[in-house]
Amino acid sequence: MWAETRWESKVKSVEPMRYHGAAMREALIEVRDNTKDPAIKAEAQFLSEEVGSYRFSICTVVWYDVLSAIQHVSKLMQFPNMHVDLAVNLLKKTEQGLQSYRASGFVTAQMAAKDICEEMNVEAVLKQKRLRSTKRHFSYESR
């Protein structure tokens, strides 16, 4: 039952972020405010900003939903009396479910992430990440 433990641990590791993100962010802010070490303060500040971002909330919701679906099928396929035709049908249904999630799941993930952001009192806006640009001091390409 190695796979059961592995999938279950993946789902359990994302679950606190999915359902208790506001409490985790508050704990990080408390660590930031109460520590004297500047490295810990900077790390707690960065993590609290990341956990409080709308993008991170969307990613957490999507990741949790996908892992939960895969874990469910994984557990069903581990039964000792599982037949190959049933396993193939389960995999096909999972594939169809993931494809339908691709079509409509992002919208539901956005709504769930908005609720999470409201709980944390942060703005639910996707911010543009700064793109890095490099200067070319000379041409790297040769003829």
Image: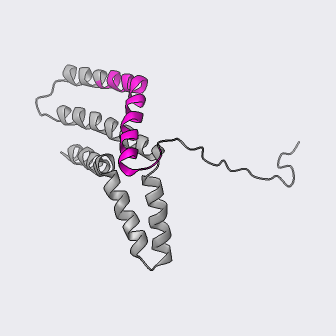
**Looking at the figure, which quarter contains the N terminus?**
top left
Q: Is residue 112 left or right of residue 72?
A: right
**Residue occupying the point 44% across, 46% down:** 56
**Residue occupying the point 28% across, 45% down:** 11
Image: magenta residue range: 94-123
Q: Nearer the viewer, residue 22 or 73?
A: 22
**Residue occupying the point 86% across, 49% down:** 139
- Percent position (x, y) of residue 89? 25, 20
Prevailing secondary structure class for the magenta stretch in the rendered image:
helix
Q: Is residue 53 left or right of residue 5?
A: right
Please say whether residue 45 is one of the residues in the magenta stretch: no
Q: Is residue 111 above or below residue 99?
A: below
- Percent position (x, y) of residue 138? 87, 53
- Percent position (x, y) of residue 25? 38, 58
Q: Is residue 35 above or below residue 100?
A: below
**Residue occupying the point 51% across, 41% down:** 125
